[in-house]
Amino acid sequence: MTETQPSQHISGSGMEEESVNLTDFLEHLQHLLVENADIREFLQDLVSMTARKLTSKGNVIACGVTVIRQKKPVAVADSDPLARKLDYIQNSFGDGPCLTALRTRTIANVPDVRQETRWPDYMKAAACTDVGSILALPMELNSTAEAVVNLYSKLPHGFSHDAILAAERVTATGAKALHLALKMAQLRDARENLTAALESRTAIDTAVGIVMAQNRCSRDAAFQILVSASSHRNIKLRAVAEGVIAHIAGDRRISASFEE
């Protein structure tokens, strides 16, 4: 049994530094950011490239990434069916090296799945697959999101000391890009929410004007009429407003009074 290991920092010899060339890895991640890729598309490319970067002759690595964001569904991406199956099994048990690494912010190394005594339920299920060893590395995102990289080898002791150093380096690089991708996604969400709010306000203002004209009443009174209709019908105020507009002007889309 190998205890959960604290994250190691790469500082040393040229051998580890040269073991993984990250030039094309960085270029591809930068391209995704420039192209404003969807977060799930970004994650899928991230796991595929991570798996390829860490695969060596005779030792094929599978990769999964799990991202947890506030008020958002958990995002999961996997490089192949083995990683997908093992991530699914672990999430169904609610415990395992991935979730431990995520919770403790330390590396969880399982040199031999069939000899591991931690997480017995998960390990028993994992032993029924082709996996021989597992390495889970938390991603430092410096944000409200949390993420972890899960690496799987079919070989027992598939992650040597140098392989772990390489995995840390790739994970750290991916984390920086993921941090930017999540920030960009957050900005897109905020922009979409603002646009929706402005469109809703435009529809409501237009409907208020229609009700004022029809009932010869004040703006406040017209607004209260819409609010009462929304409450009595148990539908959103914007839907009531759009219904008023559709009744008067036909089913035409109401847009904000400005362009981006």
Image (spheres, helix red, strand yellow):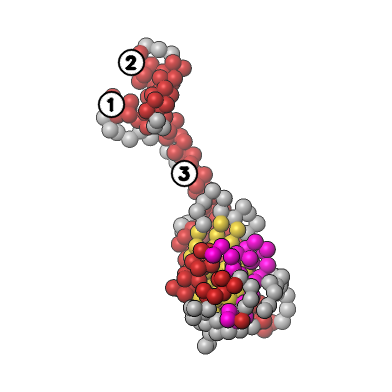
Please tell me whether residue 113 belongs to the stretch shown in magenta: yes
Q: Nearer the viewer, residue 115 or 45?
A: 115
Q: Secondary structure at mark 3?
A: helix
- First of labels 2, 1 by sequence position: 2
Q: Which residues are magenta?
A: 93-114
- Pair 3/1: label in front: 1
Q: Which residue is mark 2?
A: 214
- On screen, residue 234 above or below 3: above
- First of labels 3, 1 by sequence position: 3
C-alpha separation, residue under disc 2 versus residue under disc 3? 33 Å
Single out the residue that lies furthest toward the bottom. Answer: 58
Residue at horizontal 40 percent and vertical 12 percent from the top: 217
x%, y% of residue 33? Answer: 51, 60
Residue at horizontal 49 percent and vertical 78 percent from the top: 128
Q: Amino acid at mark 3?
A: Glu
Disc 1 packing (10 Å; few <14; some 14–19; many ≥20): few
Q: Secondary structure at mark 1?
A: helix
Q: Which residue is mark 3?
A: 192
x%, y% of residue 191? Answer: 49, 44
Q: Nearer the viewer, residue 231 or 25?
A: 231
Residue at horizontal 44 percent and vertical 30 percent from the top: 201
- Indicate the quadrant containing the N terminus: top left, top right, bottom left or bottom right: bottom right
- The picture quadrant where one finds residue 211 is top left
Question: Label for residue 164?
Answer: none
Q: Nearer the viewer, residue 124 or 253?
A: 124
Question: Label for residue 247?
Answer: 1
User: Circles 2 and 1: CB distance less than 8 Å?
Assistant: no
Single out the residue that lies furthest toward the left. Answer: 250
